[in-house]
Structures are given as structure tokens and as C-alpha cells.
Image: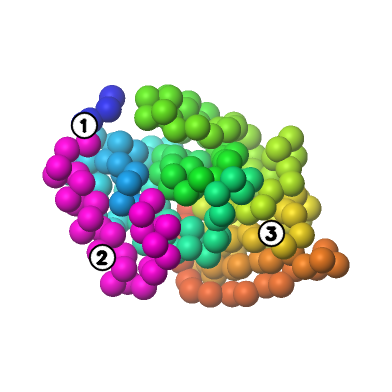
Amino acid sequence: MLQADTYKEKGARKLLVQELKEKGISDEKVLNAIGSVPRHQFIHKDFKHLAYLDKAFPIGEGQTISQPYTVAYQTQLLQVEPANKVLEIGTGSGYQAAILVAMGANLTSIERQNKLFVKTQKLFKALQIEANLILGDGSIGYALNAPYDRIIVTAGAPKIPDALIGQLIVGGIMIIPVGDNNQQTMHILIKKPDGSMENIQLDQFRFVPLIGTQAW
Ligand code: SAH
């Protein structure tokens, strides 16, 4: 299943990092993680030769591996510190998860589709990536490992799920795209000491839908 990480891949990753810098990603820790995670391992064999283009690709089950720019954008907003407890909703290919682990996160990532969950679990074993991969509905969070310093949602939500707010520490940050089926606005939510949320809205994106109890 694994394809060696050759000089060709390393070179292609450097060019991708350069491209992301030009598109406005400036956080060195994020750029280093993009430069170190072998994206070609997370992509179907038909698209492997295109792995370092700034593009999304199908990963099966009607889902996609997010575009590197989107991964870098969300990760930059998340401001992950080493040893932060991070919850990701929407494991998918595991690429975003691998970036978070590369940045030192203590990661729990949840996926609702069994096939993707099993596939990514195998891949993480092969690549020796340490994370708690969970099968389930992430729209209600994952109470067993809560509370979290950071929460990142990688599917488009119709609204901010209350359960996720409840599982975030005071001072914690949640990054979530919220909108309709066509377009979502990236939201940064910061939990204030009184439990209320500061809410900053940024650029527009298009994600696959978040499906679940507190979702579509
Ligand atoms: N972070 C992924 C992006 C995958 S696309 C990557 O880097 O590849 C979003 C994923 O969210 C899909 O795999 C989809 O099945 C999953 N998803 C949608 N709703 C979900 C929910 N309620 N709980 C967990 N996963 C969900």
C-alpha cells in the first residue's frame, strides 16, 4: 500500500509549500507540517501523481481529501500548540489529522463512514501516526476525551453544534465552516471565561456536508 517517499515527492512538497506561502499561509509550523506529511500516501492510486497539486481529490464514499490550501488555512487559524488536546470532526483520508499530529497535537479524530475509518486506521498504522481514530457521529463531539483545547470541523455544518461548544475549554478555539450546501463561511469561535463565544467570520469555502444529529 505504501509508496516510497522519494526525492521527487520531497521536491514536489517543497513547491507546494512555496505555492501555499504565495497564497497567504505564513505560519511556519503549518508550512513545516505540510512540507513533512507525505500527501501521496493519503490519495487514491489514480491521483497519486497529482498529490502535490493544490487540489481536492475523491477518496471514495462520495467524500474528498481537502485541498492543501484549505487544510493549511484551517490549521493556521486553529493555532495548535504541542500537546494540545485536539478534536477533528471528519477524519476522511486522514491527511488533515496527520498534519495536526505532525504539529504535536494529542489528536482525537472522528469519522462517520466505516469504510473511510477502517482505511485510515490501516494507513496510520503503516505510517506509524499516533492518533485516537473514532468511528461515530462527530456532530455530537466525542465526550469520552473531552474537554478539548481545539476543535476543527472539516465538513460543512448548517449551524454550530451545541455539543461541540460544550466540549471546548475556556480559551479554546474551534474552527468550523458554516453555511448551506453550496457555500460555507469559515468561523473562528473562542470560548470566553463566562462561557459565551466570540465569533469571527472569514472567507467562503465549499466542503462536503456534515451529516448527523446536530448537522444536516
Ligand atoms: N479531514 C479530511 C476531510 C474529509 S471530507 C481529510 O483531510 O481528508 C469530510 C469528512 O467528514 C468525510 O469523510 C465525511 O464522511 C465526514 N463526516 C461528515 N459528517 C460527519 C459526522 N457527523 N461525524 C464524523 N464525520 C463526518
| Label 3 Cα crowd, 10 Å radius (few <14 / some 14-19 / many 20+) | many
**Identity of the amino acid at label 2?**
Glu
**Identity of the amino acid at label 3?**
Gly
Q: Quarter of the image containing the N terminus?
A: top left
Task: State how far apart marks 3 and 1 are (Cα).
Answer: 38 Å
Residue found farthest to the right: 194
Q: SS of the residue at dot 1?
A: loop
The answer to which of 212 and 171 lies nearer the viewer is 171
Task: State how far apart marks 1 and 2 are (Cα).
Answer: 23 Å
| Label 2 Cα crowd, 10 Å radius (few <14 / some 14-19 / many 20+) | some
| Label 1 Cα crowd, 10 Å radius (few <14 / some 14-19 / many 20+) | few
- As drawn, the label of residue 172 is 3
Identify the residue shown where x is 42% and y is 57%: 29
Q: Earlier in the sequence, mark 1 or mark 2?
A: 1
Determine the main secondary structure of the stretch shown in magenta.
Answer: helix
Identify the residue shown where x is 36% and y is 54%: 32
- As drawn, the label of residue 12 is none
Determine whether label 3 and label 1 are within 8 Å by CB.
no
**In this view of the protein, can residue 212 be seen by the observer?**
no
Identify the residue shown where x is 69% and y is 48%: 148
Q: Earlier in the sequence, mark 3 or mark 2?
A: 2
Q: Is residue 46 above or below residue 15?
A: above
User: Which of the 4 image quarters holds residue 213?
Assistant: top right
The answer to which of 197 and 14 lies nearer the viewer is 14
Q: Which residues are magenta?
A: 5-33
Q: Which residue is mark 2?
A: 19
Identify the residue shown where x is 53% and y is 75%: 202
Q: SS of the residue at dot 2?
A: helix
Q: Is residue 193 magenta?
A: no
Q: Which residue is mark 1?
A: 4
Image coords of residue 142 (percent x, y): 69, 40
Q: Earlier in the sequence, mark 3 or mark 1?
A: 1
